[in-house]
Amino acid sequence: MSYIDDNLMPEENVIYRANLHWIIFVLPIIVFILFFLPGAANLAVAITNPELQGMALFGGIMMLIGILPLVFTYITRVTSEFGLTNKRILVKVGFIRRKSIEVLLTKVEGIQVEQGIIGRMLGFGSIVITGTGGAKSPFRKISAPLEFRKSVQEQIARVQE
């Protein structure tokens, strides 16, 4: 089960869920192309040519450098959760080092969306949740941040009725 589902209060229902946008994979894919693919080619040549056996280790290291950013980014995406319930906003980011925030809707002073030009075109941005007391919690590269904000605002309006 997910963090959000595990931490629901009685009579609390999930209204909206968001994820990290696929854009987080762009840099790891570039690193993969620059390191893993040449490393694999290097390893293949070293295996087939006995004179270049020393290059096999270099090829393996290049492949490892190429794949690790993709693995870490995938773990980050899978372990990041952004949710809105009928009572709270719940956010959990991280696997080993976890950051979580749970704000009652009645304690939300504002939710800000920050998007650049590319973010607007591709549908990602940052959300900054401001709770009472001025505590700000930014979360970057969220998919459809305007939808998240709209859902939060609609739910706050329902709670206040």
Image: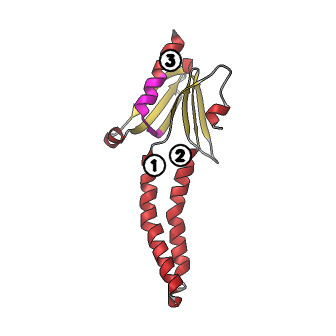
Q: Amino acid at mark 3?
A: Ile
Q: x%, y% of residue 7?
A: 66, 30
Are discs 1 and 2 less than 8 Å apart at CB? Answer: yes
Q: Earlier in the sequence, mark 3 or mark 2?
A: 2
In the rendered structure, which segment of residues is drawn in magenta? 140-152
Vertical relation: 93 (above or below) 11: below
**Vertical order, 47 against 104 (above or below):** below
Residue wearing tag 2: 77
- The quadrant the N terminus occupies is top right
Residue 151 visible, this orientation: yes
Q: Quick one: 108 or 57, which is closer to the camera? A: 57
- Name which residue type carries label 2: Arg
Q: Tell me if I can see residue 110 in this picture.
A: no
Gap between marks 3 and 2, in whole Å?
27 Å
Residue 61 covered by magenta stretch: no
Q: Residue at x 54, y 80 (%)?
A: 56
What residue appears at the point 51 percent right and 58 percent down from the top-left corner?
69
Tell me the residue at 42%/29% (across/down): 147
Residue 156 bears which disc, if any? 3
Q: Secondary structure at mark 3?
A: helix
Residue 44 drawn at (x, y percent): 50, 78
Q: Residues within 10 Å of mark 1 (few under 14, many from 20)?
A: some
